Each structure stands twice: as structure tokens, then as C-alpha cells.
């Protein structure tokens, strides 16, 4: 009766709940009648617009069975009412008064009874201590509290409030939710909203580990998610793994079999999720989302999986990507996978007169592929010359790339010349093309500078060869071994063995042990040329140690024999040649 009097004694004031009204309403933990709560809320209709109370009325109809609301249920209902009116801070105060710890045992018991219901067939079995509508009322209160805290920029507290819901359900139903769980009380809908909302809150709270853990639980626990919701969570998770900037610990999937694939990094996990989403799109299980293909292409490119990317492109439905773009992208994938035959065939199809014979990126890629194969160097020259027809319409960098590929192709083509005059002519044309690149790019393209220095060296013009090789080292910052080796070999050709050895020493200081094999081999030859046989032997011992490490890591007897044979050949060439300037 004390509570009834308190409720009836409340008067209309400013049109919203104040602290004294709430404290008066909850001064006793006895039950309040539902109709009294409704009468109390109706008294404010003439002051503020009536909120959408459809969900509230549903909860009230289920709670009428007991004839009243207890203290915690009343707070959950009134907090929801305040939230719908837009009184966020007031709603948080009401929600914070709910002692969820005291209600949790009854909620868990109710959920466990629902889980065991198919096994219980006796009418004498005790009924659950709470109805599903009451459980949903508390869960929805925690969810609305989380949303209110988020709007107040208290994201970490919001995440903890939302996490309470999922922790209760996971501990009560460790095997997952039964089918049609809570369908008649909208409990399933509330849980799905919490599952999808929690990772976003952890991200706003700058807690990446908790965000990733909540994403994994959302996808691994049985929440009865619909296909679109599951796909949306998978996409958001994969995007977060790709672009968040932090590396997460690998998932611990103890329930999987030993032969199952367990991703070991963010990139692998994101790629796996995106591949699953892509397969669902192909099977039309979810709506088509072009951003999934974009993210997947990025992930596979970064992971250096061109073959998998080619499979994705080939599996795209017709009309998603233009034929010309498909041919060019597939050619790039096959070329990255060292399948130059397939890549060149695709480019020939692209550059056919029936498709796009003037496709500049295709012409340049075809010229590059041919320049890497001495037997196709003539074709490479033809493709580069076709591209150069349109150099006036392109920027200096693109035109420089055209000249570079022409020069490289001509240089390779010169090696197959029958006569000396023909070889000299092609080498001269190659040098002219590479110099054109240098003029257009101000020697900013490392590939053209490397081949320019190499071409001068092949023509025994060692002074400009040394100059351009030094320019290459400055351009690359000494990060590429080929620049050091080129300079050392050119100096060796000038018989400046001491300077060449100094270059190799500088390169060894900036190079990891795995990449020192060729440098050590060159250094040993230089030491031998200077008559330092003991030093040359010591250098070869270091080379042997590097090869032994590689041998142990490979573990293959064939590889071990190949390494040994290579070492023997190197030793024989050391004794036989004597001139490091002739190192191939």
C-alpha cells in the first residue's frame, strides 16, 4: 500500500521525471500494479509528445500475468520509457539502479529450463522463475543503457553493459541458442542487436583485443543469426582486421579438427572471412556487395596470393567487370604467379584488333613480360614501339616507362644478334632509349638507371657506368643488392679491386645474412684477384656457413646436393677465372 500511495501521490511538474519522483516511486521494493505505472506515464501526455510505446505495451501484457511489477522490472520499464522520450541521462540513472547481479541467477535458471524443455515432458516439472518477456525486458534495458552511455561518450561502460547480456546467455546456453528461441517474446531480436552492437562499442572504446574477441564470439557461438546479419558481421570484422593497424593474436579454435585451417595473422583471418562472403555472394545466399570483392582483392594482393586473386576474378558473374579490365587484371595475376605463358596469351587476346589493340597498360605489361624472356625480346620491342605511338598523350613517367621497356627489350634482343654490327646497332638503340627515359624522369626511375648503367658497362664505357651505378645507389638508398653488385663489378672491370671490395663490405653491413651469398662470392673473387688467398678462403667459409643455414632450413637432400655442387663450382671458378670483372 505504501508503494501505491507513493505512485498516486506523484503530481505533474515539469513534464519529465525528476530525481525526487524516481526516488519516491522506488522507495519500496514491493510490487507496483501495471495499471498504476500506466496511469503515471499517461499523466505526462499533455506536456510532451507521446512516445512509441508499442514495445512497452508488449512487455506489460506479459507481466500482467503476475498482476504486478517488482522493483527491478519497474526500473527497466521506466528506464525504457525515459529513453524513448529522449531523456538519455535520466534513463541512465534509472537503469543504473537495476541490480542485475541479483536478477542474473533467475535469468540463467529460466534460460536453462528453456534449453532442457524438449527433454522435460512431465507436467509436474517446475515452471521457469521468469517469463521470456521479463528476461527480454532486462536484456533490452541493458542494451538501451549501453546505447545511452554511447551517446554520452562513455563507450567502455557501454560495452561492459552490453557484454553482460551475452555473458549471461553464453553461460546459460554454452551449446548455443535452440531453434526459434524467444521468437514469441522478441528475445532473439534483442540478442542479435546486442551481438552486433558489442564489437562496435569496443572499437569506440579503443579496446582492439576485446573488439576482435567479441567479433569471434559473434561468429563462432550459435546465436541463430540470419544470413544477412552474419554476413554484415563478417564483413565488418574483416575490414577491422585489414585496416585497424594492430596485429591480433591468432584465434584458439579448440573445437576444430587438427586438419582444419587456423589463420595465423590478421591478414589470413580477414582473407578467409572475405572468401567465405564471396562464395555466399556467388551462390546468391546474400545480396551482392561490390565492396567485398574490393576488400578481398586488396587482402589477396597484400598476402601475395595472385593465383587466388585470379580465381576470384574468374568466378565473378558476367557484367561485374569489363572484359578489357578482366583480361588485364588476370594477366597481372598470372604474371605475378610466374605463369608468363598464360599472362601473355591473355594480353594477346586483349590487344587483338577485336578488343583493344591500343590498350597502353596491356602493351607495357606485354613488353615487360617479353623483355624478361630472351626468346621473346623481339616481341617486346614491337609492343613497346606500339605504346610509344601514344607517348605524347601520356605523362613523362608513363612515357619514360615506355622508353625503359623499349631499351630493356632491345638490350635483350641484341644478345640474339647474328652479326656484330647488328648487335652494336641494337645496343646503341637500347642506350638511346634508356637515355630518353633519364631525360624524361630526371633519373628518378631505378629500373631505367640500372639498365642504363648496365648498358654502358656492356659497351665497355665504364666511366658513365660507374656514374649511373652510384646514382642508382643514391636513388635506392643502398637497399637493393643489385646496385651494390653492379658497382662492385664495374669497379672490378676497371681493376679497382680494393674499391670494389670496399663496396661489397658496405653492402654486407646493410644486408641480412640470408641475402649475403652473392656478395660473399663476389668479395672472395676480389680478394683472390688481389692475391689475398687466405682472406678469400675465410670469405668462402662464411659463404659456406650461409649455405649450411639455408640447407638446414630447406631439409631436402636434393637441395643440399645442389648447394654443395654450387659451392664446388664457385670454388672452381675462383681458381680458374681469376678476374672478378667477368662475374656473370
Image: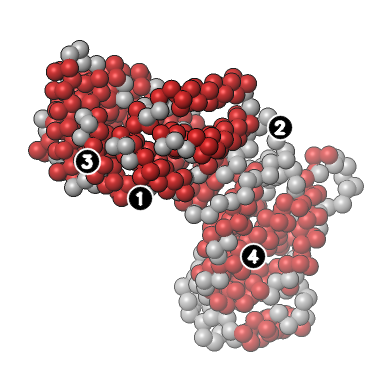
Point out the image quarter for the C terminus: top left
Residue 559 visible somewhere in the drawing: no
- State the separation of the CA atoms marked 1 and 2: 46 Å
Label whose residue precedes the other's in the sequence (1 or 2)? 2
Which one is in front in this view, the residue at disc 4 or the one at disc 1?
Answer: 1
Q: Which residue is mark 2?
A: 258
Q: CA distance from mark 4 to mark 1?
A: 53 Å
Label 3 or label 2, whichever lies nearer to me, is 3
Q: Is residue 47 left or right of residue 469?
A: right
Q: How far apart, in angstroms, are the residues tagged by discs 4 and 3?
A: 74 Å
555 or 229, which lies in front? 555
In contact (CB < 8 Å): disc 3 and disc 2 = no
| Location of mark 4 (residue) | 161
Mark 1 vs mark 2, foreground winner is 1
Mark 3 and mark 2: span between their CA atoms? 62 Å
Which callout, 2 or 4, points to the residue nearer the camera? 2
> Upstream in the sequence, badge 2 or badge 4?
4
Residue placed under numbered mark 3 in the picture: 463
Asked if residue 357 is positioned above or below residue 507 in the image, the reply reads: above
**Secondary structure of the residue carrying numbered label 2:** loop
Distance from disc 3 to disc 1, alpha carbons, whole Å, reads: 21 Å
Q: Are marks 4 and 1 in contact (CB under 8 Å)?
A: no
Amino acid at each position: 500500500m505504501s508503494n501505491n500511495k507513493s505512485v498516486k501521490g506523484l503530481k505533474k511538474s515539469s513534464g519529465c521525471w525528476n530525481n525526487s519522483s524516481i526516488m519516491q516511486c522506488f522507495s519500496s521494493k514491493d510490487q507496483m500494479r501495471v495499471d498504476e505505472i500506466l496511469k503515471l506515464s499517461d499523466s505526462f501526455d499533455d506536456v510532451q509528445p507521446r512516445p512509441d510505446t508499442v514495445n512497452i505495451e508488449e512487455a506489460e501484457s506479459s507481466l500482467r500475468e503476475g498482476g504486478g511489477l517488482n522493483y527491478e522490472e519497474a526500473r527497466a520499464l521506466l528506464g525504457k520509457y525515459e529513453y524513448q522520450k529522449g531523456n538519455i541521462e535520466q534513463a541512465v540513472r534509472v537503469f543504473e539502479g537495476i541490480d542485475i547481479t541479483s536478477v542474473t541467477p533467475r535469468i540463467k535458471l529460466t534460460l536453462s529450463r528453456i534449453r532442457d524443455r524438449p527433454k522435460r515432458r512431465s507436467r509436474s516439472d517446475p515452471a521457469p522463475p521468469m517469463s521470456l518477456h521479463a528476461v527480454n525486458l532486462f536484456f533490452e534495458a541493458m542494451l538501451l543503457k549501453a546505447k545511452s552511455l554511447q551517446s554520452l561518450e562513455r563507450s567502455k561502460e557501454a560495452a561492459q553493459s552490453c557484454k553482460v547480456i551475452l555473458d549471461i546467455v553464453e553461460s546459460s546456453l554454452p551449446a548455443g541458442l535452440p531453434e526459434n528461441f524467444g521468437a514469441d517474446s522478441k528475445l532473439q531480436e534483442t540478442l542479435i542487436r546486442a551481438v552486433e552492437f558489442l564489437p562496435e562499442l569496443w572499437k569506440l572504446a579503443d579496446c582492439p583485443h576485446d573488439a576482435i574477441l567479441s567479433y569471434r564470439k559473434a561468429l563462432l557461438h550459435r546465436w541463430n543469426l540470419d544470413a544477412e546479419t552474419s554476413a554484415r558481421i563478417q564483413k565488418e570484422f574483416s575490414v577491422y582486421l585489414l585496416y585497424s593497424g594492430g596485429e591480433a593474436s591468432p584465434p584458439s579454435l579448440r573445437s576444430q579438427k587438427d586438419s582444419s585451417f587456423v589463420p595465423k595473422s590478421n591478414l589470413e583471418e580477414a582473407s578467409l572471412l572475405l572468401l567465405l562472403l564471396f562464395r555466399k555472394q556467388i551462390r546468391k545466399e546474400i545480396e551482392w556487395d561490390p565492396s567485398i570483392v574490393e576488400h578481398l582483392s586488396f587482402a589477396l594482393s597484400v598476402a601475395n596470393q595472385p593465383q587466388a586473386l585470379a580465381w576470384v576474378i574468374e568466378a565473378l558473374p558476367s557484367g561485374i567487370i569489363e572484359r578489357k579490365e578482366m583480361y588485364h587484371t588476370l594477366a597481372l595475376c598470372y604474371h605475378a604467379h610466374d605463369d608468363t605463358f598464360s599472362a601473355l596469351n591473355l594480353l594477346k587476346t586483349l590487344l587483338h584488333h577485336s578488343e583493344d589493340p591500343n590498350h597502353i597498360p596491356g602493351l607495357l605489361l606485354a613488353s615487360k613480360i617479353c623483355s624478361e624472356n630472351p626468346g621473346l625480346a623481339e616481341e617486346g620491342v614491337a609492343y613497346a614501339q606500339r605504346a610509344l605511338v601514344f607517348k605524347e598523350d601520356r605523362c613523362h613517367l608513363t612515357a619514360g616507362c615506355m622508353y625503359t621497356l623499349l631499351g630493356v627489350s632491345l638490350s635483350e634482343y641484341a644478345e640474339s644478334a647474328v652479326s656484330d654490327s647488328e648487335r652494336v646497332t641494337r645496343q646503341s638503340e637500347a642506350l638511346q632509349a634508356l637515355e630518353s627515359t633519364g631525360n624524361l624522369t630526371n633519373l628518378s626511375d631505378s629500373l631505367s638507371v640500372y639498365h642504363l648503367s648496365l648498358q654502358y658497362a656492356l659497351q665497355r664505357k665504364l666511366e658513365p657506368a660507374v656514374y649511373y651505378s652510384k646514382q642508382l645507389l643514391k636513388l635506392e638508398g643502398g637497399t637493393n643488392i643489385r646496385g651494390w653488385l653492379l658497382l662492385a663489378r664495374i669497379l672490378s672491370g676497371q681493376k679497382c679491386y680494393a674499391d670494389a671490395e670496399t663496396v661489397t663490405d658496405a653492402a654486407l653491413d646493410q644486408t641480412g645474412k640470408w641475402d649475403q651469398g652473392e656478395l660473399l662470392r663476389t668479395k672472395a673473387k676480389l680478394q683472390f684477384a688481389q692475391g689475398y688467398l687466405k682472406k678469400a678462403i675465410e670469405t668462402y667459409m662464411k659463404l659456406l656457413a650461409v649455405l649450411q643455414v639455408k640447407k638446414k632450413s630447406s631439409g631436402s637432400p636434393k637441395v643440399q646436393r645442389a648447394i654443395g655442387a654450387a659451392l664446388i663450382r664457385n670454388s672452381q671458378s675462383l681458381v680458374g677465372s681469376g678476374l672478378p670483372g667477368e662475374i656473370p
